[in-house]
Image (tube, helix red, strand yellow):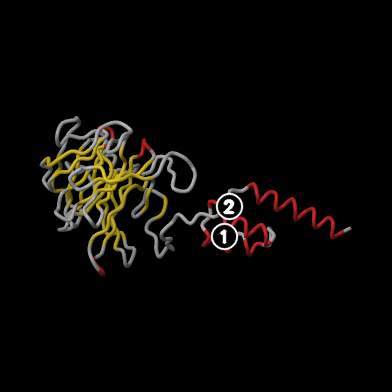
Amino acid sequence: ANGGAMGRMRGEVEGMVGMLDLGRLSRRYLGDVVEGSGLVSGERYREIYEGASEGYDREFDVERSFGSRGSGAGQFEGARHVAVHGEGADRRVACADLKMGRVLIFRVESGECVCDVGSSEGPGKLSQPMGVAYNGRGQLYVSEWDHHQIFVYDGDGAFMRKFGSLGSGHGQFNGPRGLAFTAGGELVVADSLNHRVQVLGEDGTFVRSMGSFGQGEGMFHSPYDVAVCPDGSIAVADGGNCRVQVLSGEGGFVRSFGSEGDGPGQFRNPV
């Protein structure tokens, strides 16, 4: 009788586990989370394993973390984009804190918070920083959502200059977000609410614009972030279209991947 009760309980537990979307776990974690739990039979585990996603090229373990939640020194309330520059003991990571209106810079090796950028009164004061990127000389570029400008600081966090204004003309912005630098030193900006990507010189001089509003190839709906690939092509997180598009360095469409949804390889507003 006891064995029957245990069998029924096991069946109920397996039914509950079956309702969980375990297929979203990668195969790497199924062994830790499912197989060793004893909650599912070996046959059921094999079914889950065979259906698990293999759509990830690489998976990473956490080596270290920076900051914690809060408004104090070295803390975040609304962490956004990050950028890394330097080598060895001088290597630094910058992270924009949208809610606190500042960018925090940490030493990668020690985790020490080196400086707080953009919180002091003056022309370099930030309101809603979003994207961050270092140029080859270690100068920090920050996209300012509220002011529709790009702010530039030296390696120690001192304000240098800013450029841009609200508008849809060349070198103007409407809600700039992600930033990246090309190997040639050009600045790539996700000009989100203008539904385009702009390429500028380090001084803000307009070079070219890519894309327009829409769903077709090379068109965008609120692009959120940009990254420059090793071959010089530009990957764009096309948030409103729930996909990633890849353009050539000159702006020509190369390919796209992803679609709207919750399945493997699908997105809900990629950022």
Residue closest to the eye, 213 or 69: 213
Mark closer to the chain start, 2 or 1:
2
Q: Determine which residue is flagged by label 2.
A: 22
For the residue carrying disc 1, how many other residues have a C-alpha within 10 Å: few (<14), some (14-19), or many (20+)? Answer: some
The picture places residue 245, in percent across and down from the top left corner, at: 31, 44
User: Mark 2 falls on what kind of element?
Assistant: helix
Q: Provide residue 118's location: percent of width, then percent of height.
A: 24, 46
Residue 168: mark in rendering: none
Residue 30 circle label: 1
What amino acid is found at the position of numbered circle 2 in the picture? Leu
Report the side of 111 relative to 36 (left or right): left
Camera sees residue 258: yes
The answer to which of 218 and 119 lies nearer the viewer is 218
Residue 74 placement (x, y as % from top left) = 34, 55
The answer to the question of whether label 2 and label 1 lie on touching residues, with beta carbons closer than 8 A, is yes
Q: Tell me the kind of residue under disc 1.
A: Leu
Quick check: 259 left or right of 134? right
Above or below: residue 187 compared with residue 149:
below
Question: Is disc 1 placed on a helix, strand or loop?
Answer: helix
Q: Is residue 210 above or below residue 140?
A: above
Residue 119 visible? The answer is no
In the rendering, at what x and y percent does residue 265 appear?
44, 48
